[in-house]
Image (tube, grey):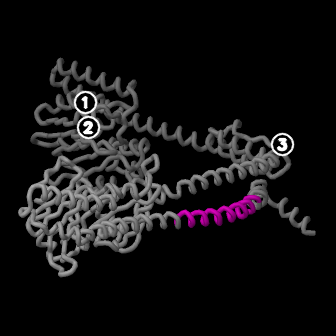
Amino acid sequence: MAYKTFNRFLKSLSIKKKLTYTLIPVILVTYLLSVGSVYMVSFHETKSIVNQQAQTLANQRTQLVDSYLDQLRTETEIFMFDTAFQKRFRTNRSTLSLSQQEELNKEITQYMYSMIISCNVYVESITLINNHLDSYNWHMDGRNSYSAYISRLLPLSDTLTELDGGILYTYDKLDQGVVTIARLIKDPIYGRKIGIFMLDFNLGFLNKMTGVRTKDQSAADALLAIADQNGDIIYNDSPFSKDELFSVQNGSARLSADGMQYQIDSSKSDANDWILYSIINETALYRNINRNLVWQVTLILISMLLIFAVILLVSRTLSGQFRHFIETVSHTTAPDVHALITVDSEDEFRDLAQVYNDMILRINHLIETVYTKELLLKNAELKAFQAQINPHFLYNTLDCINGLVDLDRPNDIKKTITALASIMRMSIKGKEIMTVRENIRYINEYMFIEQLRYPDNLIFLNEIPEEMMEFYIPKLILQPILENSVIHGTSSLLGKGMIALLGKEEPDALIFTVSDNGVGFPEAILQLFRESPENHLDDTQTQSRLGLLNIQKRIHLMYGTEYGLTLQNLPAGGSRVTIRLPKITTP
């Protein structure tokens, strides 16, 4: 019964749902739960152990620093409690013979050697001065003079007296890795000062203590940084700056540097006032764990791919039709008979293919019956508007020639006819889209004709920037607007008529303006253009501005309503027409 129910459930699903809801999820979840649970437990356990070991190592590093400082303190006690040494050290050398002075120097130097051997080779110098200002010095660097050590120790005398036996840390030569400690030498019985001493030791021993670097110079072991109570960095082999280290105060934090994650712990030294920072490079520490993670995830992915491959192999017969359907649809570039799908199965793919084929046929029919007709209608309207413009211009030009005949001006008649022929050639045979430069050439021809008609009262100004000349605009767009300014604007003036053609380039459009000092537009025409001039082509006032209406309709058909004409009257008299056209660089 359960099997039949499950079988009916599978039959009710599509092929994609059969694969999605059954085989793949069940196998995937089972596999991930079993493998993932085992892996996550082992991964976190391993990571915890490695982190604990690294933390222990970091603690050992800081403890070793304290241990070394304690050792220095202990070894310097030889000058404080060794009565044999103090007896020789209190001796005033000026009371001794030369041979006795040499013997005294050897004995005190032997004490210094004993301390150096106990502390190890990182001690670089020891300087002693007694109350008689007799000085003794051992130094490893032969380049430094005897007096240089004495001059460094004497200024510390007052401070050491105030410390009364406490250790003073100074860092005069820290740039060379040298830290200096100094203290009083006191009589252990009476507590009286018998002298002072200074010891230089090199921080180079810390490099050995903080472990070995990996080949890529990232610290696999603990790094170390040391700062004093004044906020000065004494030692730092980590990639962090002073400010970054000081942000970690008496606690721990995680910081990043050079794409790596570091665990930083700060603590106060038990031996002095130093702050010790132990830095663990967690990225390097977990590198092997992460590498194992990558390998294990890769193996898991490979095994999952094998499982999926088996599932796909078994279901190839069913999914083959699905892939065929997708490939046919994805390669469809036009809704024609080549886009139809043929399915030889009896399942839901047959119904899906039938619905798809019916849709393709309907789309193809709509394109043929609607889109094509609309395109033809648009082209027909453009031609009709152009046809309206051309006769209107021809009529006015012939009227101009007639006036020249009455004035008996044969040379001007010849120039006018030549200009008219050039304009008509452009209108009849020229391309629909022309450069601004070509349009301006024909506008100059037209304005030449108009200035012959009105020689005494028509001034034409043409200011089109050179950078606009190579853009493409429709022909016979600017000329009818200039014609409107002449006929309806300046021709009825008693004084000088002025017409200006200006241009400017905006980021997404070309702007042309035609301004005149004529009588301006009637308010009804301005209101008409603010509304929808295409709906008023039969009005009496509209007929007088047919050229402007045709241009507006033409621009709207070609480029959309965001482009077109804007009409306005100027406050000082006259009118302005602004033409907004798209920036087109190719015809």
Task: Report if residue 544 is visible in the image.
Answer: no
Label 3: which secondary element: loop
Write down the residue under mark 3: 344
Q: Nearer the viewer, mark 3 or mark 2?
A: 3
Q: CA distance from mark 1 to mark 2?
A: 9 Å
Mark 1 and mark 2 residues within 8 Å of each other at the beta carbon:
yes
- Please report whichever mark, 1 or 3, sits nearer to the chain's N-terminal start: 3
Q: Amino acid at mark 3?
A: Asp
Rate crowding at label 2 as few (under 14), some (14 to 19) or many (20 or more) other CA atoms within 10 Å. many
Write down the residue under mark 1: 446
Residue 183 - label: none
Mark 1 and mark 3 residues within 8 Å of each other at the beta carbon:
no
Q: Amino acid at mark 1?
A: Tyr
Q: Residue at x 40, y 41 (%)?
A: 554
Q: Quadrant of the N terminus?
A: bottom right
Q: Nearer the viewer, mark 1 or mark 3?
A: 3
Label 1: which secondary element: helix
Residue 24, given in percent of the width and then of the height, sits at 75, 57
- In this view, the residue in front, 59 or 87, is 87
**Residue 343 quadrant:** top right
Write down the residue under mark 2: 483
- Please report whichever mark, 1 or 2, sits nearer to the chain's N-terminal start: 1
**What's drawn in magenta, residue-wise?**
27-51
Residue 418, given in percent of the width and then of the height, sits at 26, 20
- In this view, the residue in front, 6 or 481, is 6
Rate crowding at label 1 as few (under 14), some (14 to 19) or many (20 or more) other CA atoms within 10 Å. many
Residue 303, given in percent of the width and then of the height, sits at 72, 51
